Amino acid sequence: MLRPPRALLLDFGGVLVDGPPRPPGARRSAPPDLVRRLHLLVGPAVPEDRIGQDLLDGARRYAEWRHAASAEPRPVELGHEQVWGEFVTVDWPEPAREAVRRAATPLSYAWSWRDDWEVRPGIPEALRAATDAGLPLAVVSNALCGAAHRDFLTAAGLGDLFVVQLYSDELGLRKPNPELAWRAAREVDVPVEQCWFVGDMPDRDIRCARRAGAGAAVLMRSARTGRARPLSDCAPDRVVEDGHGLLDLLGRTLGG
């Protein structure tokens, strides 16, 4: 039996929110609005078709970097300027690179935001059941731009349910760095060993929970979960399919 939690630490993407999975074989494309915005910013020095391809290549390189960082004991996050400069605009003319550096934060917000984000099924019910039971809630998420995540939760009517929202770009730390979980536990004023950590990625969320000494590591399956490699140090205590599964687990554990 799991010990009842006194607080919940929850990932954003794959737990609170997700987008529809890409159809098999669907071709990736860069966000058209972001491509146009960048073209207006840098002028004719970089053609639109090159901007689109460099965004796709940059996203791939950034994803590879994130995957490698998950194997580090205390990974740190890159700043907005670093992400654009090291993964997207590497070979652009210097005036164009400088223009992107100056606008790196609003560009990161635009790159992070997804119009197809949806609150995962059962999450509002699970969050409200937790708060009704007196459990403080915290978001603990890796993010290119956490401000976009925070604004989405506010627009969805869920932002006020959280005591704190911690995002990697704002703290300079990335999961599985346990400091993120420790900071969240301090913010909700509950010892981390009495917190449940809920995430969808074994190498980031479950590993973070284990390193931090969280009371329980709960894996919520998402489209990304099935693509993750099984890791010996990342076995969860429980697995749920969505917010309804989390609600049921809370009810059985809290005796509701």
Image: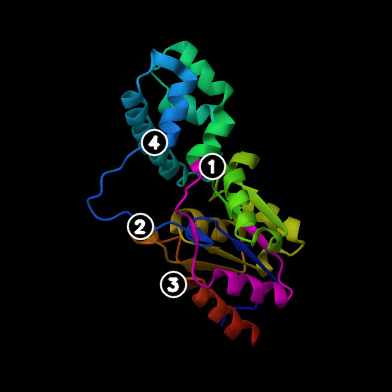
Which of the two marks, 2 or 4, is nearer to us in this view? 4
Marks 1 and 4, Cα distance to the nearest angstrom?
32 Å
Label 2 close to label 4 by CB (< 8 Å): no
Q: Residue 228 at x, y = what percent?
A: 36, 56
Q: Is mark 4 on a helix, strand or loop?
A: helix
Q: Residue 173 at x, y = what percent?
A: 59, 42
Residue that label 2 marks: 21
Which of the two marks, 2 or 1, is nearer to us in this view? 2
Residue that label 1 marks: 75
Marks 3 and 2, Cα distance to the nearest angstrom?
15 Å
Q: Residue 147 at x, y = what percent?
A: 62, 44
Q: Residue furthest left?
A: 25
Using the rendered image of the protein, determine whether residue 150 is visible from the camera's viewpoint: yes
* Three-letter code, disc 2: Pro
* Three-letter code, disc 3: Glu
Tell which of 123 and 205 is nearer to you: 123
Residue segment shown in magenta: 112-139
Tell me where residue 54 sits by quadrant.
top left
Residue that label 4 marks: 32
Tell me where residue 86 sits by quadrant.
top left
**Tag 2: Cα neighbours inside 10 Å, few (<14), some, or many (≥20)?**
few
Image label count: 4
